[in-house]
Image (cartoon, rainbow, N blue to C red):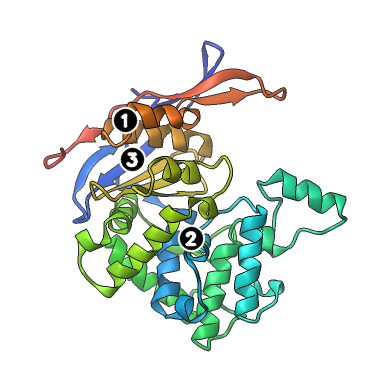
Amino acid sequence: MDNPIKVFRGKYLESTHQIHVAVVNVKGELLYSFGDPNRLTFPRSSMKPFQAVAVVETGAADAFQYDESELSLICASHNGEPIHRNAVARILDRIDLMENALQCGTHIPRDIDSYNKLIRNGGELTPVFSNCSGKHSGMLTAAVYMNEDVHTYRDIKHPHQQRILDVIEEVCGFPKNDLEISVDGCGVPVHQLPLQNTALGFARLADPLGWMPSDRARYLERIRNAMTKHPEMVGGTDRFDTDLMKVFNRRLVAKAGAEGVQCIGDSKTGLGIAIKVEDGNGRAASVAAMEVLKQLGICDEEKYGELIQYADAPVLNARKDTIGRITADFKLHSYAGAR
């Protein structure tokens, strides 16, 4: 099984993707893997739930009366649909900042209807359309509440970025001094750590009190509950994270990251899953994730069928005809202690 993810055009194999998978429990024990479970990886936006924990820990989310949908939003890589943009606008209004305080840049949103309406009305793309605008509004909320500089909140030396490092160190079980730091697509620090440690973070996000009873575990629980109660805020229409959490009805918490990263936590088993597509192509990530969930016995036949478009993903042409499939062909390696 040298080609774990296969892309077919008709009946012909056209392309392949290599993947790495780590599955761990809340203790950090590696139970299953494929490829290199310790591959150094930038989890990218998969780290947003832990960045959100730092906002809640300051007391800022409560002080500015965040509801659970807004907590979910600050974990999001959203489509830029009206529900997402309006929620960001509400947060900014509450902390008395203008939209230009967001330093995430902007881009064409995934929600094409919103983009077409913007063009028809002669509008311009602004930062609120960025898929990371929720995360940035959360960081600004913490900076405002803590009376810190809102102009330098992206700087790794900023107190809020240091708080994020503290969260990652404890939850992911990796010393912050060993983290390699670079810059994410939206301009904030991004952290490199072994894939296994990212999986550990998601195990503890899924089952925080099974990890340890503490204030930080309770903050993780709040973030998990917000994401799973309001999955529409995490991604949006036709997004794997959103649809997976909806189908599993609050059991799974999921967050994708750029360059082919997908992370999932299972609150029932306390397992954390981290996947990295070696070439960074995100089209392979959901296919790999669905196969992992199936092999672990987490995804039964009924739910698999509900999510089939992500497990046996169609390859479409410009006419929207299905002319091929993306499929999985690998078997997880199990270690002592695995079920």
SS of the residue under disc 1 = loop
> Which mark is first along the chain, 2 or 1?
2
The residue pinned by badge 1 equals: 300
Dot 1 alpha-carbon crowd within 10 angstroms: few under 14, some 14 to 19, many 20 or more: few
Residue at (52% x, 21% y) in the render: 325
Residue at (44% x, 39% y) in the render: 278
Dot 3 alpha-carbon crowd within 10 angstroms: few under 14, some 14 to 19, many 20 or more: many
**Does the rendering let one see residue 175?**
no
Tell me where residue 222 appears, x and y as whole percent: 37, 65
* Furthest-left residue in this view: 336
Picture quadrant of residue 101: bottom right
| Left or right position of 78 against 28 | right
Is 195 in front, or is 316?
Answer: 316
Tell me where residue 255 appears, x and y as whole percent: 44, 50
The residue pinned by badge 2 equals: 72
Tell me where residue 313 appears, x and y as whole percent: 51, 27
Distance from Cα at disc 3 to Cα at disc 1: 20 Å
The residue pinned by badge 3 equals: 21
Q: For the C terminus, which image quadrant?
A: top left
The answer to whether residue 274 is above or below residue 13 is below
| Left or right position of 23 against 245 | left
Q: For the N terminus, which image quadrant?
A: top left
Mark 1: which amino acid?
Asp
Mark 3: which amino acid?
Val
* Label pair 3/1, CB-CB below 8 angstroms: no
Tell me where residue 262 appears, x and y as whole percent: 43, 45
> Which mark is first along the chain, 1 or 3?
3
Disc nearest the viewer among 2 and 3:
2
Mark 2: which amino acid?
Ser
